[in-house]
Amino acid sequence: MREDTTIPFRSPAFRDELSDLVREGAQRIICQAVEAELGAFLEEHAGEHDAQGRRAVVRNGYLPSREVLTGVGPVEVQVPRTRDRSGSGRRFRSELLPPYLKKTNRVEAVIPWLYLKGVSTNDFGEALRALFGESVGGLSPASIARLKEGWDCEYAEWRKRAWHGEEFVYLWVDGIYLNVRSGERRCLLVVVGCDARGRKRFLALEPGFRESKESWKAVLLSLRDRGVKAAKLAVGDGSLGFWSALAEVYPETRAQRCWVHKTANVLDKMPKSVQGEAKSMLHEMWGADTRAHAQGAFERFCATWEAKYPKAVECLAKDQDELFAFYDFPAGHWRSIRTTNPIESTFATIRLRTAKTRNCLSEKSALSLVHQLAMSAEKRWGPLRGLRHLADVITDVRFINGVNENETGREAAELKTAIHNI
């Protein structure tokens, strides 16, 4: 950590030397932790470069200093700032010091942060005393009830949001199962859309009866009524309920099977002793630079395993066309549209948070909590790569193996670079 990251305190008229030492120690630890977060963020994007070949994401000073009220008094902190030279809008956000955790005299302002971090309502008092000191009293049941009622209202309003005038190019869909009170499991039908500006948005977080056609159809009809037009491509797992509903509500939308789900399904039908080799062969398919090369890898897989593991080959072959649909879209989008990762990566965190509080979550409160977590995650999503090709997809320009059929020369070279980076 750089020495200049420590911010001197303003000297009060009366100084308690011991308290000053404790606060300075707390400040030093916070700075070190935030710098560690920044280091991890920069390392994650170390391989990305701008048009001039420079490192895309770099440090860019600090945000204005602010105070966080802790158990040892106010601690002044600064969060580092980054700059994205590529124009993609990626920036560092500290999980330890989120923007909404500031100095405040209202304890209620920090309650959502505690809840979203997985702190049970039974532990709120202890957590708040750790943050604000022993002078903070306990929370009344009425305060917690008001918090939950507010979230319920926000979720109810969000479910009615109109999307007229917006155009969504891609959809990612999945059924997520969450544990609620008494060990019950509820299915949450999730839809994420990518709009014409490359922004990913949650469109639906709806309770459903398993992943039935009727449940998915109700979700899609609601989206259509609220202004969501047919997307160019929908990405999802092998749920027959969704694809049947999609064919009725949005028959123009093409299907792309998620390669992560498909890989898991195929390997599940093979013994562990051969799964490593089989997984490499599957990777060769979706990692191929052209549909022809992918087809060759597909045929090799079938020829290798069909005699011993026919169910695995059948599982792969039945969705062959849908697995390779991404080759008809820009190569810069392949990384995003081959899997349902925008949903899976987000809900890995959400499952962790809801698991910590499941003993105090009914189905209703679980939905409103998941909505809050989803909206928080949405703010951190970066835009879709290959933004310049979205307009081509919207206007139905034909892409062959990821390349606009009218592009040659320079664009073909860019394709090779894009594939190399995937």
Image (cartoon, rainbow, N blue to C red):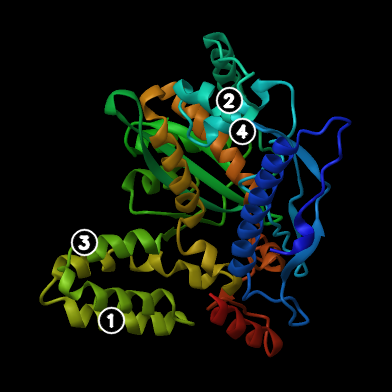
Residue 260, position in %: x, y? 38, 62
Residue tagged 1: 299
- Residue at 63%, 37% in the rendered image: 227
Which mark is in front, 2 or 1? 2
Mark 4, other Cα within 10 Å: few <14 / some 14–19 / many ≥20: some
- Residue 260 vertical position relative to residue 366 in the rendered view, above or below: below
Residue corresponding to mark 3: 268
Q: Secondary structure at mark 1?
A: helix
Q: Which residue is mark 2?
A: 129
Q: Mark 3: which amino acid?
A: Asp
Dot placed on the residue nearer the N-terminal end, 4 or 2:
2
Say which element carries label 2. Answer: helix
Q: In the rendered image, which quarter contains the N terminus?
A: bottom right
Residue 160 appears in the picture as rendered: no
In terms of depth relative to the viewer, which is nearer, 337 or 5?
5
| Amino acid type for the residue under numbered disc 1 | Glu
- Name the residue rendered at 47%, 64% in the picture: 338
